[in-house]
Amino acid sequence: HAQKAVENARVSIEENISKHQPNVEKFLGEVEKNVSNAAQQLQKNINRDPFNRPPLTQEEIDSLDLIYVTPRIIASLFPVDNKFGAPKQRTTKGNDIDLMAAYMHQKHREKFLIWNLSEETYNYRYFNQRVIEFRFPGHPSPPLAMLFNICASIENWFAADPSNVAVVHCLTGQGRTAVVLSCLLAWIGEAAASPMECLAMIAVLKDREVGRLVVPGQLRYVEYFSNVLDGVRPREEPVMLKRVIMNSIPNFESNKMNGEMGCCPYIQMFKMGLLLFNIPYNSENEGKIVPSLKRDEERKENSEVKHLVVNWVYISDRSASFEVNRIVQGDLLLRARHCSNKEPKRENMFRANFHTGFVPSGVLRLKREDIDGIGDDERFSQDFFLDLIFEPVTPSSKDTNLESTDTKDEHNLKLDEKFWSDIESRKIAREERMAKHSTIEESKPNPKEMEVSSNQFSINADDDERSKKSKKRIQSTNLKEIEIQQSSISNAELLAQFEMLDKGEESATKIMEVTIEKNEDLNELEELEKELGLFEQSNEKTGSKSNEKEDLDDDIKGLE
C-alpha cells in the first residue's frame, strides 16, 4: 500500500508539473522581462546624472527655453520631469529637468542659484539643492515685503561672486517671473529704467504684449514697487474696510424663482492663502442657503455657524453692497463668487489683490481693466467697477473688530529709516544713470539727417535686429549668452555703489523660505485649486487678451 501511494503521488506530481509548465514558463518570462526593463531604466537614470553627463548637443541646447535677461539673470520655464517613476507634477510644459540641470552644471558650474516661485517642488538633487523657494499661495504676485526680500537675496548672491548667476522661474515662466525680474532690474540698477519700463523690456524678450504677460493684479504690484523706489512711503497702520460696492451687476444666470437675470454673489478675503471672512450681498429678499464653509469639527463646536445665506442681485438693481466692517492690513486678495443653480454650484466671478498701504483715503476704485478674471467676459458690462470703502481705525472699532481678522502677519511691510536711506541712495544712482543714458541718446546722430542707401539698415532697423536677437534662446554649442542692450554702468560699478545688507541679516545662502500653515478651511482650499476654471472659461469664450489662465497655474496651487 505504501509503494502504491508513493507511485500515485509521483504520477500526480508529474501531471501537475506538466499541467502548470506553461504558466511557470510565462511567469519566468515576465520576471526576465521586468529585470531587463529595470536594467534599462537604471542605465537611463545613470545617463540622466547631470554631474557626469556628456556635453549637450546643439539640438538639446535649442530645446531649452532659457532667456538671458542679462548675462547674470536668467528667466526659465518650470523644470519638468516626465520620465518614468518621477513624481507627478501639475504641468507637463517646461524645460526638461535633465537637460536644464546638465546645462546649468556645464555652463555655470556651481555659480548658479534658482529662485522657485511656483509653489511646486521638483527633485532639487538635479541642481545640487541650489534652489530657494518663495511661497505666496493664491496671490498672483509676491506680497510687497517678500518682493523686496527676493530682490535683496538675489542682489546678495550677485555680490558674493561676480560669476554668480540667478535663475528665476514660476510654473509658466510668465506672470510671476516677469514681476520679480522687472522689479529686480530696477532694484539693482541693471537697467536705467523704472520697474514698469523693465517690465516692457521683459515683454519684448518674451515676445509677448505686457497685457498677455501679466494680469492687472501683478501690474498693480509692479506699480507699488516703483512707488517705493521713488520714495513713496506706504501707510503702516491698519484700516477699516467698511464695504465693497459692485457697480453694474454681472449677468451670470436667471433666478429660478422669478426668472430675473443677475447673480447670487458673496465675497471672500484672503491673506497669504488664509480665508479671513465671507460676506454675502445684503438684501431684504429671501436668502439662499448654501453649505457652510466651516469644517465639521467647527460645526459641532459652534452650532450657530452652519450655513452662509446669500441673496440674488439683479441687473435692474444696478449695484450691490457687501457690508464688511473689518480691520484689514497688508497684502490682501479679494475674490467674488456666484452661487449657481447649475454645476459647479460655486462659480468664480473675479479677484483683485491690493496692499492697504497704498489704498487712497476713502475709496479704492477698481475698474474693469484693473480686476483679474474679467478680461473680455461679456457677462460683465463695459462700465463695471468695484468701490472699496475705507475708514481710519478708531479705538472703538479696534476693540470690536480687531479679532475678526488675522492681523498677525510676519510679511507686513516694515520699513525703517535704514531702508529709506538705502532707497534714497538707489534713487540718486538711478537718476544719474538715466541722465547719463539721456546724454548718450542725445549724442547719437539723428536718423532723419542720415543718408542711408536702399541696401543698408537704418538705425531703427538695427535696433529691431538687436531686439530680435535678444528674443532668441541659447544659440551655440559654447552656450553663448543672448546679446541684449546693457546699461552703460558695469556690474562692478553697481556693486561699488550699493552697500550689502548687514551680515546679521539674511544672506543669499540662507534665505528665509516663506511657508504658511495649512488653511483650516479644507473646502476653500479645494475651491482655490479649481479657480482656474473661471479663467479658462473667460479666455475660451471671449478670447481675452490677458494671460490669466497661465498666470493662475502659478497662483492656485492653493495650498493642498
Image (cartoon, grey):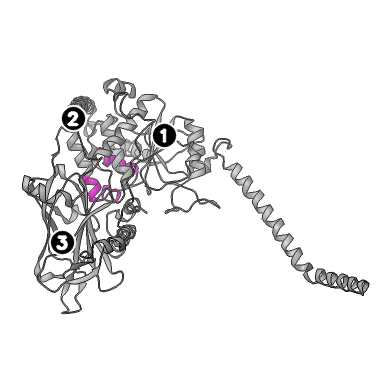
Image: magenta residue range: 197-220
Is disc 1 placed on a helix, strand or loop? strand
Q: Nearer the viewer, residue 341 or 510?
A: 510
Query: Could you tell me how far apart the alpha carbons at marks 2 and 3 are, in whole angstroms?
Result: 43 Å
Is disc 3 placed on a helix, strand or loop? loop
Q: In the image, is residue 209 part of the stretch drawn in magenta?
A: yes
To which quarter of the image does residue 543 belong? bottom left
Q: Which mark is residue 416?
A: 2
Residue 345 at x, y = what percent?
28, 69
> On screen, 402 above or below 299?
above
Residue at horizontal 54 percent and vertical 51 percent from the top: 83
Q: Residues within 10 Å of mark 2 (few under 14, many from 20)?
A: few
Going by the image, does 410 lie left or right of 77? left
Residue 223 at x, y = what percent?
20, 41
What amino acid is at disc 2? Asp
The residue to which callout 3 is attached is 382
Q: Residues within 10 Å of mark 1 (few under 14, many from 20)?
A: many
The residue to which callout 1 is attached is 113
Is residue 8 visible from the viewing direction of this image?
Answer: yes
Residue 314 at x, y = what percent?
13, 71
Quarter that holds the N terminus: bottom right
